[in-house]
Image (tube, rainbow, N blue to C red):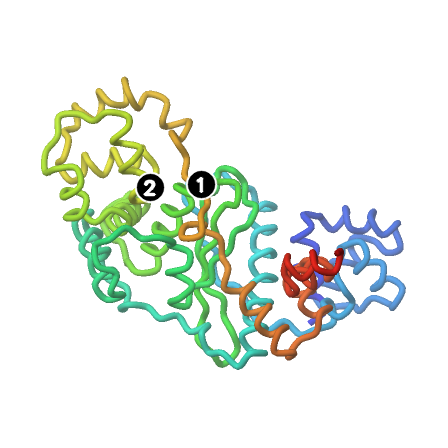
Amino acid sequence: MLGERLKIARKKAGLSLRDLALLIGGQVTHTAIAKYESGQMMPGSSVLIALAKALDVSLEFLAAPLQVRLGALEFRKKSGTSARERAHVEALVLEQVERYLLIEEILGLDSATWKAPFTPRRVRSFEEAEEVAKKVRHDWKLGDDPLPDVTELLEEHGIKVMLLPLPDSVSGLTCLVERPGQSAVPVIVVNASHNLERRRFTLSHELGHRLMQIEEVDEEKTSHRFASALLTPADHLKQQVGQRRHGFGYKELVETKHLYGIAATALLMRFRDLGIISAETLSTMFQTVARHWRTKEPDQLEPSTLRSEEPRRFRRLCYRALAEKVINLPKAAELLQMPATVIAQEMRGADASKDRRQ
């Protein structure tokens, strides 16, 4: 429906009803726009064109039926987000999920199905969260080795991962997107401004929310424990650093955090949780070698071929559809939200562009 599309586009732009009315030069009032969004009225063609231009969307976008609905968007507790910020994020998620599902439909893929390793487990302690993480590794045949790319892993198993600009207080969130007559699609959104260590932990944390029914213990701390156990399996970590330690030097710590792709403070907390160091040793380290680590990540991870933590599957599918000629260049530009000239150049490759210039 046009009204639903209009509301999504307005929220994505971060505009109030009054803001949008002003942006189109007062052609109609904010009350009229509210009635368009609720389906009580339909705009005339000139107003519709003005709305599309003001919101930077196509008329086709506003006219197309909305195929997905957003379930409850689970922001982290105490994130401090405003209602307007939440609405903006909801609109971004809906729009991006819809484009993702569309390219899968065009290619005839059913990979939107969430391949959960098991039904959600009831968890009443941190130790049970640790066991759930072990079961994920076992059922997904991950072994005990460090995970090279958490984003790629989740996308392989049917979770839509999105890297979006979020308020700085929000590390990430998860939700289910509902489709008529089909299974719901799980989505995990991570903050694009956060470093790789934090994004990897957020992805793992939000996976924990999908796989655990947490009772009687703090939900966020329990999901933290799940994430730590998934990223740093206890047996593997103890083989690397030892069963019991009285301290660590800077170089060993940063090399260990690079091995597992985890934040340095999270690694220290993991040492404490597993009994590798005592609570007293942890406190001493936060006063000495790690005294600034809560505010500044030491020796941050850099994106690499094996570990970028950027969602790539959607882009791959769009380029596949373009190469197979099931979509044209303008459609690819619309789906990828990129200039057609850039997409065309990427299809040709750097060598082809250089050859033409010679």
From the viewer's perspective, is residue 130 above or below residue 138?
A: above
* Residue located 40% across and 66% down the image: 156
Mark 1 or mark 2: which comes first in sequence? 2
> Image quarter for residue 353?
bottom right
* Residue located 44% across and 41% down the image: 302
* Residue located 76% across and 56% down the image: 357
Q: Is residue 287 left or right of residue 166?
A: left
Which residue type does callout 2 highlight?
Ile
Q: Is residue 72 left or right of residue 60?
A: left
**Residue 48 seen in the current view:** yes
> Image quarter for residue 325?
bottom right
In the picture, which quadrant includes the C terminus?
Answer: bottom right
In the picture, which quadrant includes the N terminus?
Answer: bottom right
**Residue 7 seen in the current view:** no
Front residue (pair 95, 216) = 95
Q: Is residue 134 left or right of residue 34?
A: left
Q: Which residue is mark 2?
A: 262
Residue 10 position in % (x across, y down): 70, 54
> Image quarter for residue 122?
bottom left
Q: Which residue is mark 1?
A: 302
Which residue type does callout 1 highlight?
Glu
From the viewer's perspective, is residue 221 above or below residue 7?
A: above
**Callout 1: SS:** loop
Q: Residue furthest top?
A: 288
Front residue (pair 96, 340) = 340
**Callout 2: SS:** loop
From mark 1 to mark 2, how far is it between C-alphas?
12 Å
Count of numbered badges drawn on the protein: 2
Front residue (pair 356, 12) = 356
Residue 182 position in % (x across, y down): 47, 78
From the viewer's perspective, is residue 271 above or below residue 59?
A: above
